[in-house]
Image: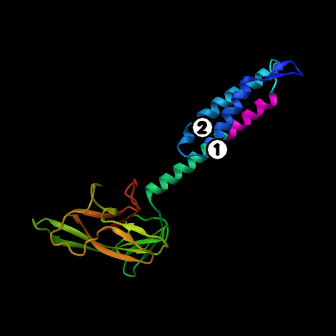
Amino acid sequence: MVDNAQGRSHSAAAIVGIVLGVLALVLSWVPIINNFAAPLAVIGAIFAIVGIVGTVRGKRSGKGLAIAAVIVNVIAFAIVMGTQAMYVAAIDHAANGPSATSKSQDKDSSDKGSSKGDYKDLSAGTEVKLENGLSVKLDSVQGDLKNYDGSKVIGIHVTYVNNGDKEVSYNSFDWKGEDAKGAQETATYYSEGTDELNSGTLAAGGTVSGNIYFKDGTVKALYTSSFLSKSETASWKLS
């Protein structure tokens, strides 16, 4: 394209830069696809800068277009970075499950911690409240159980209360037992087990309780609000 007034053609680099910038800007809001928007914005910015250099030297016209291309590409890149951070945070939150927000103790509980803060090594009878309205409590511990083969088993009784306004899930696999060496295992089979916690969905205002059994030597019960979480949401001492 030729600028008749100056006898100079418009900067092709500036035109390419603005086209790539607009494309990157459009794609920057689309999840997954916006992974391609960042490289487009970088390439577009490079073309735009080349266009600016050409117009400054007087070889081409279209300096304003080139500057606009730089701005559009920078904005597109910034949006990509911002949306990526937002998506990653949302995925992490979904994977880790709702966090604990407070705790409360039964009168006979030995846990004297504050209502907020530390949710590790709690005493039986301590209830932990999650940000989605679910409350989880390890009610009691039974340490004198014997299995069919004579091996010892430790049982815990837990309660879920849904104080939120949406359904929440519960599962015996939310729980693991940890021994003194730090080995963590899921529940074990107990031949005399009764009222065992199953899995299901708890309606708003609902409550469910049940027993879970671990192998002898288990010193902690760990609760995780999501099976994808890398660490427990809360833990209770069993002795």
Q: Secondary structure at mark 1?
A: helix
**Where's residue 157, x and y in %?**
29, 74
Q: Nearer the viewer, residue 152 or 29?
A: 29
**Where's residue 169, x and y in %?**
39, 66
Q: Nearer the viewer, residue 229 or 200?
A: 200
Q: Main secondary structure of the magenta part?
A: helix
CA neighbours of label 1 inside 10 A, class few (<14), some (14 to 19), many (20+): many
- Label 2: which residue? 37
- Label 1: which residue? 79
Number of numbered discs present?
A: 2
Precedes in sequence: disc 2 or disc 1: 2
The single residue placed furthest to the bottom in the displayed view is 107
Q: Is residue 177 magenta?
A: no
CA neighbours of label 2 inside 10 A, class few (<14), some (14 to 19), many (20+): many
The answer to whether residue 95 is left or right of residue 196 is: right
Q: Residue at x 69, y 28 (%)?
A: 16
Q: Are marks 2 and 1 in contact (CB under 8 Å)?
A: yes
Q: Residue at x 71, y 32 (%)?
A: 18
Q: Quadrant of residue 203?
A: bottom left
- Span colored in magenta: 63-75
Can residue 30 be seen in this snapshot? yes
**Where's residue 152, x and y in %?**
16, 66
Q: Residue at x 17, y 72 (%)?
A: 145
The answer to whether residue 228 is left or right of residue 172 is: right
Q: Secondary structure at mark 2?
A: helix
Can residue 110 be seen in this snapshot? no
Q: Is residue 4 above or below residue 194?
A: above
